Amino acid sequence: MTGLMEIFWKELSDNFNSKRFVILFVLVYLAGVASIYIAAQNIRSTVDESTRFIFLNLFIVSGEDLPFSFPLFMSIFIPIIGIMLGFDAVNSERTSGNLSRLLAQPIYRDDVINGKFLAGLVVIAILIFSIVTLVAGLGLRMIGVPPEAEEVLRIFAFIFVSILYGAFWMSLAIMFSVFFKKTATSALASIAIWIFLFLFMSLIAGLIANSIVPINDNSTVDEVAKFDTVFRMINRINPGTLYSESIQAILLPVMGSPSPTMMMIGIYSGLKPAPLPIAQSLLIVWPQLVGLIALTAICFIIGYIKFMREEIRST
């Protein structure tokens, strides 16, 4: 445990003192403030006196000319942060020769990778918590409407899910850092996976779903529902989909289903959506949370096993 804490505090200090972290930290804060400013300027046109959870709308509303919302901003920047914290976690130490000297000390090998992961996870948690707190404070000052108790709970749930999402990308980057000797290769591999999932996974899922359940303008409601089920089953391989479905259900209390298509079918069928209590919303997104945790664990375990079995020689 002593070795683990030493690695943890060393990595935490290195992360906070690195120039790239400071630059990215500033960029993330500026983008977050811009998104909340846009939401505050447009919130009056989307809510009225009968609207509940007005404060939560700060995290949902986007601009009319610029469709940029806070969840979209988080879904883009969290992977960048996770990749930045993990792509050189192991191979940079190996290349510089620090890893062999570090393991020559009375420190267990698993303490090294565990300490690096925990330090990165704490950095992600601090960054996400601070930016959400900043956005909430600015939003409170701009609209002058305090949050309800349930809104506060939903914001904390949003923070928790965002940390899980960041942990996945960091564990993926750490895994590539173990497998590849060069930091540039591990960074490019992580970014390539992110771009593929972000841009092409939905397209591939749509093509596969349409080949299984073809739909057109004359398709029935049952056929559309089956297509949506198959599409989402395939698309949930993407952690970004799991994250977006989770935060939608958390930040939109009327979401009785992670699927907007199924919600629209329910509305056209005469069902009137009503706000759900937070316990029901968390129950809806529980499979998505389990999926994020499982993907994070798989990536970390693969990297962990590879790191424990590889030969490390002094240089």
Image (cartoon, rainbow, N blue to C red):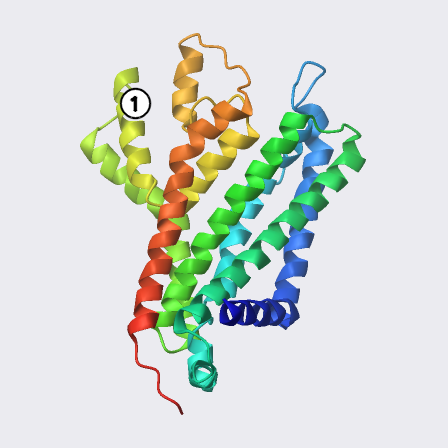
Q: Is residue 36 left or right of residue 276?
A: right
In this view, the residue farthest toward the left is 212
Give the class, few, some or many, for how many residues have Cα within 10 Å of label 1's Cα (few <14, many ≥20). some
Q: Amino acid at mark 1?
A: Val
Residue to which mark 1 is pinned: 224
Which of 43/93 is in front? 93
Is residue 237 in view from this perspective? Answer: yes
x and y percentages locating residue 275 in the rendered image: 55, 18
Which of 39/283 is in front? 283
Q: Residue at x 68, y 36 (%)?
A: 39
x and y percentages locating residue 177 in the rendered image: 40, 70
Q: Residue at x 43, y 53 (%)?
A: 168
Could you tell me which secondary element the residue under label 1 belongs to? helix
Q: Is residue 196 left or right of residue 226?
A: right
Q: Residue at x 44, y 27 (%)?
A: 283
Quick check: 7 above or below 251?
A: below
Q: Quadrant of the C terminus?
A: bottom left
x and y percentages locating residue 113 in the rendered image: 43, 68
Q: Is residue 147 left or right of residue 12?
A: right
Q: Is residue 31 left or right of residue 268?
A: right
* Picture quadrant where residue 149 is located: top right
Q: How many marks?
A: 1
Which of 11/80 is in front? 11
Is residue 67 in view from this perspective? Answer: no
In this view, the residue farthest toward the top is 270
Quick check: 37 above or below 173?
A: above
